[in-house]
Amino acid sequence: MVTIALVQRMKPILLSPPHMGSEELRFVHEAFTTNWIAPVGPNVDAFEAEFCQTVGSAHAVAVSSGTAALHLALRLIGVAPEDEVFCSTLTFVATANPITYMVAKPVFIDSDRTSWNMDPELLSTALKQRDRSGKLPKAVILVHLYGQSADIDPILEICDRYDIPLIEDAAEALGATYKGRTPGTFGRMGIYSFNGNKIITTSGGGMLVSAEPTLMEKARFLATQARDPAPHYQHSEVGYNYRLSNVLAGIGRGQLQVLSERVAARRHNFETYYQALGTLPGLKFMPEAAFGKATRWLTCLTVDPEQFGCDREQIRLALADHHIESRPVWKPLHLQPVFAEAECMGGAVAEHLFQRGLCLPSGSSLTDEDLQRVIQVIQDVYHQKGRS
């Protein structure tokens, strides 16, 4: 029996905290000793080159966030006011916000049950409808959710059929694979995030990748306030202050060296949860699609309240009572008040996952003791609620 006093003394277990090592500090120290603190610099150049090697991309531009990378991608392909951009609905709001920055219109696409990512058949149906009406979208943004790739090949084939650029939001999927390759490198452009909760972090930051050097040169220009080549400050078009600092790029270089270790740790978390909780009635873990290998950035499950005896929210609150952070699965964007007027193709699968889905603590620094604390609370909830 866990007493109130014991719970109060327990350390918090967070959902996905940063996990720092020793190499990050070495690169940051170099930035300090050379006084190269501002945006751009040798760490930025090296981070971009090393990232390209890691993911298998030809070109990369380090920027201040994954959202900034998405914004640049949409501008680079010429998204204009009133254009439609098709987008996964089961994702964080940052995927769709850049569409509104361009004064364009998001159209949301539901998930499949195999990967929880965009449903290729639904996308095909939606594009056929738009083609008949003569109003194809300007782009498709495909999200790779919770460390798992979407089924890229059929989606890319559909986009190519209609000559629509595919932008991959791989913010949550660095370290994953799709048929042996890295998600984010299949479409015309891909983006990654190094936010504090991601599998590797620069505290805040992102990366835009592409096989097209002209696009990346333009991205670098726009991200650096679109400054023209002149001895004075001259600007012929509007740009952004989106470049990553040399200090934060140093953190990224150190983090990139341990990416495979971070992936292994998160997959270990999943296996531990699955072995302990996978046989409880009503609990189903996010499946791993056969076409790739997931990082298990977050371990996610769904709760059937009739079988388990209580719902997702009761589990979340019980964990919170023990200083354990968990979160519902992303609320679909078509249900968000800010996108209340947006069109959605389908939606039932994403809504079901949101209603029943829960993300468990998944940080790569979790100890086996931490994992057992989480497991014990969920088992206790089942035995108390499920048998009452």
Image: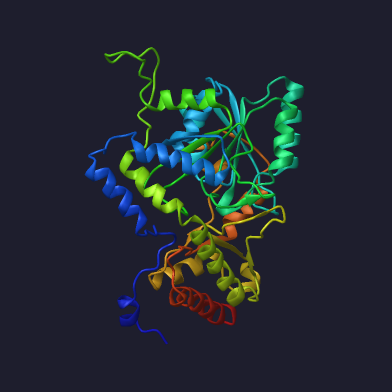
**Residue 17: % across, % down:** 40, 59
Q: Residue at the spot x=41%, y=48% of the render?
A: 253
Q: Position of residue 84 (x, y in %)?
A: 60, 26
Q: Whole-percent x and y of residue 42?
A: 35, 38
Residue 32 appears in view: yes
Q: Indicate the quadrant containing the N terminus: top left, top right, bottom left or bottom right.
A: bottom left
Point 47% across, 31% down: residue = 71
* Vertical position of residue 221 compared to residue 333: above or below: above
Residue 106 left/right relative to 43:
right
View extreme (bottom): residue: 1
What residue is at 67 percent from the left and 27 percent from the top?
164
Residue at 39%, 60% in the rendered image: 19
Q: Quadrant of the C terminus?
A: bottom right
Location of residue 344 with respect to 224 vertically, above or below: below
Q: Nearer the viewer, residue 189 or 142?
A: 189
Residue nearest the observer in this picture, 262 or 363: 262
Q: Where's residue 88, x and y in %? A: 60, 41
Q: Quadrant of residue 346?
A: top right
Q: How is the image coloured?
A: rainbow
* Residue 313 falls left or right of residue 131: left
Q: Is residue 33 left or right of residue 161?
A: left
Q: How many marks?
A: 0
Residue 104 shows in this picture:
no
